Image (cartoon, rainbow, N blue to C red):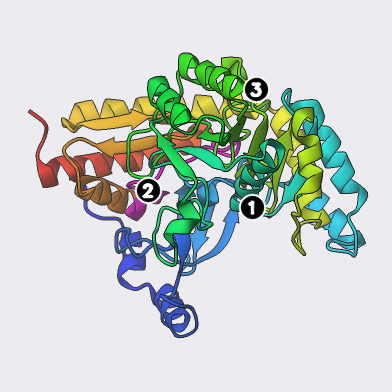
């Protein structure tokens, strides 16, 4: 294996990042919180970043890396995309948060209703948990029922009703959740039968993207069966498109399967990193949407809505979904060839534009941790357990540069753990 590069010194002499972590520990519980906490990642992962452009990040100590996390999904057309940032600057010069919304709210709602075949209306929030929670609330208001069916191990946000972590959560917060297995129609049918007459909603992710597990695309049979069972039981079909929205299909992730939800939750990529989320729904749920009290002091900010309008322009003009798929397939093919050459077993699952890479015989993710650690030393930011993201900013040259780093990282795994027999 090649020697570690000179930028390994950034890991050993992480002056600014270490200083920021120490300052943060004094004023922020744990020093960092949530999914961006790097405490469980390899030691060379920076916690703090200084700048970003295109598909590249610069950390607090000046190291530049190709980013395959895209801020955990929100960056979709490139950090500091000029058209998006021009729209942001233009709106900021007029006003952002005011005592009421600007015309950008109406323009964006019109744009989304025209774009999404299932949508007759849209409501705006600030993050994905806002959107999934509002979908559940609207479904309960519309049906007068209590039960919400959720796939086991699925992530739908950080509110008590859906967070995967138990701290501060009481049994009553989950009292009306009923679980089924994703892509298992008999499991869903049995769950619905167990609460017949009291099922308000079935909430499903665009695809199975559980943390640290192989991803799974929905089968057409499953998606169409969910639609049929919801119709039979009078329950709302809620599609959680927070993570996958606009990366799989601009019209909604289940549109290619011929399935349209009653309600859908969106966030992440809608405004290329500016804080925004929305719920879209059919006319059958319009009245219920007017009956629930849903608000936030920052939900009507105009800058993020201007960013969203510009982001949609860029996505449509450049056929971004096809580009991200092609870049993901290029990355996937390269990794597979490297794994075969080095005799390392890997599993690449899910859509190419949102890749998941896990190693065989790696229950504690030790192989994945070594792989991503070495790749980062060579300038590529990957994740050992979470699905990753492609963007419009990733070019063939970026993918090929990243593959040169992952080839060294794959060799390190083979050297450290032995080749598969």
User: What x and y, as percent, mark residue 256?
Assistant: 59, 17
Disc 2 element: loop
User: What x and y, as percent, mark residue 140?
Assistant: 65, 42
For the point 24% across and 39% down, the residue is 410
Residue 360 on the magenta span: no
Residue 393 on the magenta span: yes
What residue would you read off at disc 1?
A: 130
Disc 1 element: helix
Please name which of the two marks, 2 or 3, marks the residue nearer to the observer. Answer: 3
Looking at the figure, which quarter contains the N terminus?
top left
Q: Which residues, given as a range, are shown in magenta?
A: 376-394
Residue 44 position (above or below residue 404): below
Residue 380 in view here: yes
Residue 191 position (above or below residue 307): above
As drawn, the label of residue 260 is 3
Residue farthest to the front, as pictured? 197
For the point 15% across and 40% down, the residue is 414
Precedes in sequence: disc 2 or disc 3: 3
């Amino acid at each position: 294996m090649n020697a570690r590069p000179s930028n390994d010194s950034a890991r050993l002499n992480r002056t600014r990042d270490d200083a920021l972590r120490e300052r943060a520990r004094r004023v922020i519980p744990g020093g960092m919180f949530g999914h961006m906490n790097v405490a469980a990642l390899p030691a060379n992962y920076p916690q703090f970043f200084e700048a970003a452009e295109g598909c590249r990040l610069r950390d607090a100590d000046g190291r530049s890396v190709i980013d395959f996390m895209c801020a955990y999904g929100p960056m979709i057309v490139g950090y500091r995309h000029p058209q998006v940032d021009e729209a942001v600057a233009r709106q900021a010069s007029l006003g952002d948060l005011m005592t009421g919304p600007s015309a950008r709210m109406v323009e964006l709602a019109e744009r989304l209703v025209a774009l999404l075949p299932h949508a007759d209306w849209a409501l705006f929030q600030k993050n994905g948990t806002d959107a999934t929670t509002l979908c559940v609330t609207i479904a309960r208001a519309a049906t007068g029922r209590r039960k919400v069916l959720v796939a086991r191990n699925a992530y739908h946000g950080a509110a008590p009703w859906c967070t995967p972590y138990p701290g501060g959560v009481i049994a009553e917060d989950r009292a009306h959740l009923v679980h089924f297995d994703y892509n298992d129609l008999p499991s869903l049918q049995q769950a619905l039968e167990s609460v017949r007459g009291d099922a308000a909603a079935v909430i499903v992710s665009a695809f199975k993207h559980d943390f640290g597990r192989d991803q799974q695309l929905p089968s057409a049979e499953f998606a169409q069966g969910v639609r049929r069972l919801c119709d039979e039981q009078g329950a709302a079909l809620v599609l959680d498109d927070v993570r996958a929205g606009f990366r799989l299909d601009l019209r909604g992730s289940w549109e290619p399967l011929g399935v349209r939800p009653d309600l859908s939750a969106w966030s992440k990529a809608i405004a290329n990193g500016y804080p925004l989320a929305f719920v879209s729904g059919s006319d059958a749920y319009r009245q219920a949407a007017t009956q629930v009290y849903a608000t936030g002091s920052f939900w009507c900010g105009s800058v993020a809505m201007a960013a969203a309008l510009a982001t949609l322009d860029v996505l449509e003009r450049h056929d971004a979904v096809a580009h991200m798929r092609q870049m993901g397939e290029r990355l996937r093919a390269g990794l597979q060839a490297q794994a075969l050459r080095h005799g390392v077993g890997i599993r690449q699952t899910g859509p190419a534009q949102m890749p998941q890479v896990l190693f065989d015989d790696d229950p504690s993710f030790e192989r994945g941790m070594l792989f991503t650690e070495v790749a980062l030393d060579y300038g590529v930011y990957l994740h050992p357990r979470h699905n990753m993201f492609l963007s419009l900013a990733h070019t063939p040259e970026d993918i090929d540069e990243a593959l040169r780093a992952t080839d060294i990282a794959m060799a390190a795994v083979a050297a450290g753990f032995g080749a598969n027999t």
